């Protein structure tokens, strides 16, 4: 569904969607409560921006609040101010995104109103409000009753598993049994995503980009809903989905829920999905004045249905002429990080033109750029000298979990304390376990093991990559091999291949030949893994069976990360097995404290004294888009992800990237991320460090040793200082050619880059042609035309 209609069409759409929608310009100003004669006293520490928000008139407002801007305190003082002006707290609705945010805001509101004899409004989460409406609609007869026992994650997963087994096509049956967790997670996420929008389930399926063989998910959704309703059960997603659908389909309910509130305030609006937005619209009606707060630059949950479009456009289109306000000061990080973040995010077009800047009271934050071939070595050197307290306030953040594998193993080996989410430890991943099984077999160590242990090794080996047998046949073969303490390659090569399906016969023969080649392998364990992957076409096998593009990449990169760690040891198979045994014992021990290893998506809203960001290379940031992704929108989303990661720090930020090789054009995804050039690191560090030292000297002038940028000059203007340079006006851009917006081809002339995948990119030329080109040979034909912003 498109949300970019003309104003005329938009009014028609709104009138159709909302039966009692009132067009802009026809809404009468609401009568303001009598003003309190006593002037509200505000704390001296509040900024002018905060004061303007707190004392604003009673009207719609959209507030853009940068990371670490103190918005919770500001909103609490705003509520206090309105209460002192005589507004009825019973007519105020404050919506928070989750329970933790609600509790935090309740505490802050109590703190700023504790000396007043004022009742305060109720603070609710979206789900709490939705559940209240749900129960009301049941009483009114618009929705059927439901059990008070809300569906648990386990119950939903069980039903998803049963329906997946029943509805998925036969050719996926074996893969489903092998990868139960992935299929269940995909089904559960799909059900939840459908319930974030009014769009029909088949439209949601197409937008998510699943292949046709997974079209069973559409029937799975309908079957799940049929089961759920037959049991009179609801999930947390239904607390919002069912009431909003009921309101949407029943005009009497729009009159029932709307126009009851004078004020609605919503936090974290950048993470709003369509269902949440519609609920706000229905509840507000024509009466309530609505204030939404958020930061479009921090929209990173699109995979959950969130879209920055709601705070950037939809709100202003549906709520007449909102007051646009800003909280641009950050109290979390210093000038150096602020400059990095601004330089990066200003390349996005889907955002407010807001520049975050460090408040004078904010301590300095140091930034360091590490250009190194091995992220693990850098991380270890940074963590090694830290004491227990410093480690506990340090986070290593990844784009994807597979990046953590070599780093975690390095920390384990060097006994550096760390924390990682349950189930994410490298040694307990199925890829590492499969490689361990391979090493046990080729080293001959299975000889003295009991049959049950050998059986598990056989199962893992026959699925790494999968040999193409159906599950009962694979189990039978695994049990057969487990009966022998050696010579598995001989047993495989002695099979009657003519009795097997051609593909299974080919794979089993190749597995037997590969095991024969690797028996008593004398080289390094890293070389053995590479040989095995090449001979068995391991990565191709993983890609062919993976549920999604992302799942395949994660599995393959986990293997590569494990191999990278082992290559640093430069040990034999036997030595590697002894090393892994010791690491596994250590990993199984209870550990408290230590540095946190996590993904960027899991750390939204959190902060640490020190943040380390490894993997700033084309391979991970930006991540490879899917074929159906809008290249421009995807790149902006990845840029927001890095922005969020960098702004989690308070005192130190470490960025780890790769140095360029002698032949840059051959670096591919191993080269530095295109975002590294956008960060303008030299200027951000030099200017930011200078501001740290001259915070009180507003008339000072810095003559930088590096070229300037428009963003740097804007920042200087905000700080009231003069920024000039002794360097040349131009900067050599190091981003890949295909990452530039405009290119010139030696034959076809100028054109715009419209898309890319792992190996190629697409250019729409000004002459009307649209062609694909290899990334490896781009330097031979193209020159950049992009200008620096």
Image (tube, grey):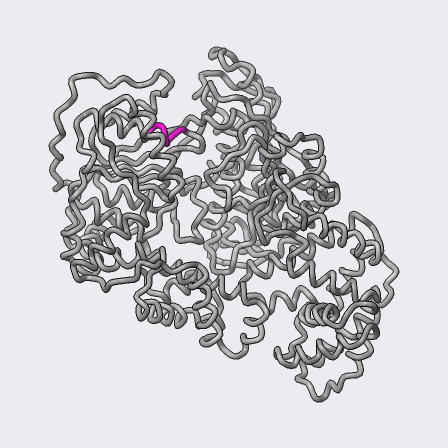
The magenta segment: 70-74
Q: In screen coordinates, is 162 left or right of 608?
A: left
Name the residue nearer the viewer: 439 or 775: 439
Tell me if residue 329 comes above or below residue 307 in the rendering. Answer: above
Residue 125: percent from the left, percent from the top? Answer: 32, 45
The image shows residue 505 at horizontal and vertical percentages of 71, 81
User: Residue visible at 16% across and 50% down?
Assistant: 21
28 with respect to 537 (left or right): left
Q: In which quarter of the image is residue 410?
A: top right
Left or right of 19 on screen, residue 712: right
Which residue occupies 15% across, 23% down?
Answer: 35
Main secondary structure type of the part rendered in magenta = helix
Q: Is residue 665 visible to the viewer in this orientation of the structure?
A: no
- Residue 73 lies in the magenta-colored region: yes
Q: Residue at x 76, y 65 (%)?
A: 438
Where residue 503 sits, quadrant-wise, is: bottom right
- Please tell me whether residue 396 is drawn above or below residue 159 in the rendered image: above
Using the rendered view, name the quadrant where residue 112 is placed: top left
Q: Does the magenta stretch include residue 587?
A: no
Image quadrant where one finds the N terminus: bottom left
Q: Where is residue 504 in the image (x, y as percent from the top left)?
A: 68, 79
**779 left or right of 522?**
left
Relative to 395, say whether 754 is above or below: below
């Amino acid at each position: 569904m498109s949300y970019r209609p003309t104003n005329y069409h938009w009014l028609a759409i709104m009138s159709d969607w909302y039966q009692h929608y009132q067009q802009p310009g026809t809404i009468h100003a609401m009568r303001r409560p009598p003003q309190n004669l006593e002037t509200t006293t505000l704390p001296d520490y509040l900024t002018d921006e905060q004061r303007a928000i707190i004392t604003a008139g009673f009207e719609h407002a959209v507030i853009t609040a940068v990371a670490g801007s103190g918005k919770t305190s500001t909103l609490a003082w705003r509520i206090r101010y309105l209460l002192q002006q005589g507004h009825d707290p019973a007519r105020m609705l404050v919506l928070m995104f989750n329970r933790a945010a609600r509790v935090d805001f309740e505490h802050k509101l109590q703190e700023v109103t504790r000396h007043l004899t004022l009742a305060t409004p109720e603070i609710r989460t979206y789900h709490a409000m939705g559940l209240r409406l749900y129960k009301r609609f049941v009483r009114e007869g618009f929705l059927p009753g439901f059990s008070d026992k809300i569906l648990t994650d386990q119950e939903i997963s069980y039903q998803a598993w049963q329906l997946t087994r029943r509805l998925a096509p036969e050719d996926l049956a074996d893969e489903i049994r092998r990868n139960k967790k992935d299929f269940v997670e995909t089904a559960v996420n799909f059900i939840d995503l459908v319930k974030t929008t009014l769009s029909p389930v088949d439209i949601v399926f197409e937008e998510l980009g699943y292949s046709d063989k997974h079209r069973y998910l559409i029937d799975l959704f309908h079957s799940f809903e049929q089961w759920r309703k037959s049991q009179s059960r609801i999930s947390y997603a239904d607390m919002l989905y069912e009431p909003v659908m009921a309101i949407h389909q029943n005009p009497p309910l729009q009159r029932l829920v709307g126009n009851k509130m004078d004020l609605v305030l919503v936090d974290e609006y950048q993470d709003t999905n369509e269902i949440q937005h519609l609920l706000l619209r229905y509840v507000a009606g024509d009466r309530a004045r609505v204030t939404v707060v958020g930061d479009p630059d921090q929209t990173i949950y699109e995979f959950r249905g969130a879209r920055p479009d709601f705070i950037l456009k939809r709100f202003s289109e549906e709520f007449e002429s909102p007051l646009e306000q800003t909280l641009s000061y950050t109290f979390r990080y210093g000038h150096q990080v602020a400059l990095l973040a601004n330089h990066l995010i200003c390349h996005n077009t889907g955002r407010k033109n807001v520049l975050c800047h460090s408040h004078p009271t904010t301590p300095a934050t140091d930034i360091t750029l590490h250009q190194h071939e091995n992220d693990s070595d850098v991380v270890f050197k940074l963590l090694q000298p830290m004491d227990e307290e410093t480690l506990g306030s340090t986070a290593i953040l990844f784009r994807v979990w597979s990046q953590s594998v070599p780093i975690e193993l390095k920390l384990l080996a060097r006994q550096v304390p760390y924390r990682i989410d349950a189930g994410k430890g490298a040694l307990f991943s199925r890829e590492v376990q499969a490689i361990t099984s391979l090493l046990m077999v080729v080293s001959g160590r299975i000889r003295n093991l009991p049959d049950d242990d050998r059986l598990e090794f056989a199962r893992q080996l026959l699925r790494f990559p999968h040999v193409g047998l159906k599950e009962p046949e694979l189990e039978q073969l695994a049990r057969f091999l487990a009966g022998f303490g050696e010579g598995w390659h001989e047993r495989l090569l002695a099979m009657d291949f003519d009795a097997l399906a051609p593909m299974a016969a080919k794979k089993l023969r190749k597995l037997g030949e590969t095991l024969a080649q690797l028996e008593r392998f004398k080289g390094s364990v890293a070389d053995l893994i590479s040989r095995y992957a090449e001979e068995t076409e391991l990565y191709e096998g993983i890609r062919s069976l993976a549920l999604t593009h992302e799942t395949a990449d994660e599995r393959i990169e986990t293997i590569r990360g494990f191999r990278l760690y082992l290559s640093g040891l430069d040990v034999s198979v036997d030595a590697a097995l002894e090393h892994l045994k010791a690491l596994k014992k250590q990993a199984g021990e209870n550990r408290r404290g230590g540095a946190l290893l996590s993904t960027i998506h899991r750390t939204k809203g959190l902060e640490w004294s020190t943040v380390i960001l490894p993997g700033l290379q084309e391979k991970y940031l930006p991540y490879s888009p899917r074929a159906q992704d809008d290249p421009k929108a995807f790149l902006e989303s990845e840029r927001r992800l890095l922005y969020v990661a960098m702004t989690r720090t308070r005192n130190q930020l470490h960025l780890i990237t790769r140095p360029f090789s002698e032949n840059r054009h051959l670096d591919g995804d191993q080269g530095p991320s295109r975002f590294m050039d956008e960060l303008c690191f030299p200027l951000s560090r030099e200017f930011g460090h200078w501001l740290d030292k001259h915070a009180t000297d507003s008339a000072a002038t810095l003559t930088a040793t590096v070229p300037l940028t428009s963003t740097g000059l804007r920042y200087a203007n905000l700080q009231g200082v003069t920024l000039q340079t002794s360097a040349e006006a131009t900067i050599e851009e190091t981003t890949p050619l295909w990452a530039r917006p405009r290119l010139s081809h030696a034959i076809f002339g100028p054109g715009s880059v419209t898309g890319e995948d792992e190996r190629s990119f697409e250019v729409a030329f000004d002459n009307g042609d649209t062609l694909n080109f290899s990334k490896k040979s781009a330097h031979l034909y193209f020159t950049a035309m992009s200008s620096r912003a």
